[in-house]
Image (cartoon, grey):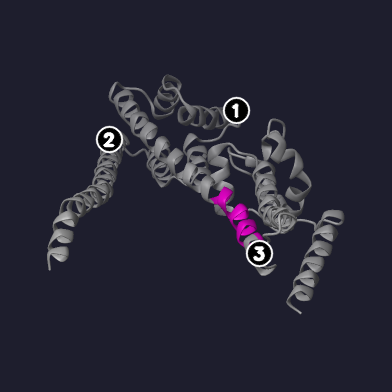
Amino acid sequence: MIAALLLGLGGGVGLWVITLGLVPPRPALGTLLHRADAGLVDPDSGDDGGLGWAGLLGRPAARVLRGVGLPGARLRRDLGVLDTPVSGHLAEKAVLAVLGLLTPGVVHLLLMLLGAGPPWPVPIAAAVVLSGLGFVVPDLRVRREAAARREEFRHALSVYLDLVWITLAGGAGVDGALHQCAAIGHGWAFTRLRRALDDARLLRGTPWATLKRLGDDLDITELTDLAATISLAGHEGARVRTSVAAKAQALRTRQLTAAEGQAQAATERMSLPVMCLFLGFLVFIGYPALTHVLTGL
């Protein structure tokens, strides 16, 4: 009965996936309008070339997964931070899930040929667990790498704020200071800043609007706050130099606090191996004496 239920469930899911692949659902109007007015970072604009064998094999499944609404908005922003195309990520998820689903069955068949095969529920449960892990692990990896890259952007933004403050103190205007300081730095963070400011100049927009959009796309609140501060100077003529200096100082303080927290966490993690080594040393020293006492009785 359980095998029949599992086969029926698998057959139904397979027919549903085939139907979605042949007749994919049409996206909603709001989704299309959002794509047309997308931000400066568009993970869908990546080229599918160079994805490797996983991207090539999982490309049909990627279209199906996108048809059902994957990935979510948060994961899409993380992919945008990493400059990873959505299709490539979904293809990797699909390939890993299929490999996790098929590997226990192949191992079970090999063990059956050798006469040592476990009962059928064992490979079925292993296939379900490995398939779920293969589908989820790429998302966890993307979130971890995106968090690290956002922290890297915050470090670059701290340097950028210092440069902007110094340039403003030298008598430059807000727009000129933003463009000049963005042209000085190197790395992907300054490249994103230059691209945003260049787009604002070409589209005849305001730099704080494009910086705000970039902060929303990258999910970096510090950049959004900077755009709000600069907009006050653009709309109301407020003096922005003091605010930029204060934000640079606050950002540096936050980074120092985070670094100290990470160092303390690393120290606490190192205490566990030391305690295990100490306990092993006690056992190594005390076991002969304890054995001698017990045998002497």
Q: Residue at x 52, y 38 (%)?
A: 210
Q: Say if residue 165 shows up in the picture.
A: yes
Q: Does dot 1 land on a helix, a strand or a loop?
A: helix
Task: Name the N-terminal-most of marks 3 and 1.
Answer: 3
Q: Does dot 3 land on a helix, a strand or a loop?
A: loop
Where does residue 15 sit, x and y in percent of width and height? 84, 63
**Residue highlighted by disc 1:** 202
Find the distance from the CA under tag 3 to the CA under tag 1.
66 Å
Q: Amino acid at mark 3?
A: Pro
Q: Is residue 13 above or below residue 249?
A: below
Quarter of the N terminus within the rendering: bottom right
- On residue 85, which mark appears? none
Q: Is residue 146 above or below residue 283?
A: above
Q: Residue furthest right?
A: 22
Q: Quadrant of residue 173?
A: top left
Residue 133 lies within the magenta run:
yes
Q: Residue at x 53, y 40 (%)?
A: 81
Q: Nearer the viewer, residue 119 or 53?
A: 119
Q: Is residue 160 above or below residue 267?
A: above
Q: Amino acid at mark 1?
A: Leu
Q: Could you classify mark 2 by the number of other residues whose Cα lies within 10 Å: few (under 14), some (14-19), or many (20 or more)?
A: some
- On residue 245, which mark appears? 2
**Residue highlighted by disc 3:** 118
Q: Does dot 2 land on a helix, a strand or a loop?
A: helix
Where does residue 33 sit, x and y in percent of width and height? 70, 50
Q: Is residue 246 left or right of residue 207?
A: left
Q: Quadrant of residue 259?
A: top left
Q: Which segment did they paint magenta?
A: 127-139
